[in-house]
Image (cartoon, rainbow, N blue to C red):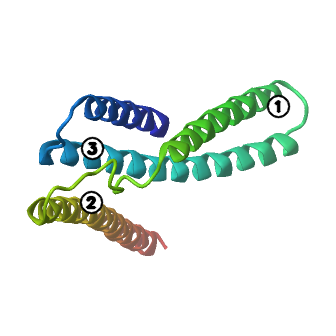
Amino acid sequence: MAQKKLDRSIKKRNEVRAAKAGSAPKTFAQNKEFLSSELDVRVNAAESKNALEKMKEDRSALNKRMNSTPAGKEKENLKRSLERKTAEIAQLQRKVQETEAGDSNPCNAKKLPIKDVLEARKIIEFLYDQLVDHASKANIQKLKAKDSVSFFVIFLKKKLKTFFVILGKTS
C-alpha cells in the first residue's frame, strides 16, 4: 500500500517536473502544482519509511516464530512468508532510496523562481494552508483513535459489570 502510494506520487512529481521544464514563464499555478507534488512525495516517503519499519518488525517476529517452530510444513510456510516479506522490504527500500536521491531543495531559485513579493506571499500562504490541512487531518485521526479506544473501554466495562452481576447471582 505504502509503495503504491509512493509510486503514484513519484509519477505525478515526474509529470509536473516534465511539464514545468517545457514551459518558459513560471506562473503561480505552476509553482503551486510543483510544490504540491513535492510535498506529496515527501509525505508519502515518510509514510513509506514508517511502513518499512513496521514491515521489519513483522519480519523479525516471523523469523523468531520460524526459529521456534519444529521442522515440517508449517516451518516451510513460515520460510516462504519470510522470503516474501524480505523481498517486499527490499523493494520498498529501493523506492524510498530513489525518492530520497531525487529530493533536492524544491525552493531553490532555479526550481521555484519567484518574480515578486506578492507571489512569494501567495506561495507562503499556500504552504501554510497545506501545513494546517495536514496538521488538522493528523489531529482528527488522533481524536478518532482516542474516541474508539474510549468507546471500547466503556463497552468492556459494561460487559464486565454484567458478567460480575451474573456471577454474583449464581454464587
Who comes first in sequence, dot 3 or dot 1? 3
Q: What residue type is labelled 2?
A: His
Q: Mark 2 points at which residue?
A: 134
Q: How crowded is mark 1: few (under 14 residues within 10 Å), some or many (20 or more)?
A: some
Above/below status of 68 relative to 142? above
> What's the CA distance linking mark 1 and mark 2?
44 Å
Left or right, 136 with reference to 96: left
Residue displayed at 33% across by 57% down: 107
**Relative to the observer, which residue lies in front, 148 or 44?**
44
> Where does the image place residue 144, in percent across and percent down from the top left?
28, 62
**Relative to the observer, which residue lies in front, 21 or 54?**
21
Q: What residue type is labelled 3?
A: Phe
> Where does the image place residue 124, in percent across and percent down from the top left?
19, 64
| Labelled pair 1, 2 in contact (Cβ < 8 Å) | no
Residue displayed at 66% across by 52% down: 57
Q: Residues within 10 Å of mark 2 (few under 14, many from 20)?
A: few
Locate the N terminus and report the quarter of the image it occupies.
top left
Q: How crowded is mark 3: few (under 14 residues within 10 Å), some or many (20 or more)?
A: many
Who comes first in sequence, dot 1 or dot 2? 1
Residue displayed at 49% across by 42% down: 102
Q: Name the residue under label 1.
A: 75
Q: Name the residue under label 3.
A: 34
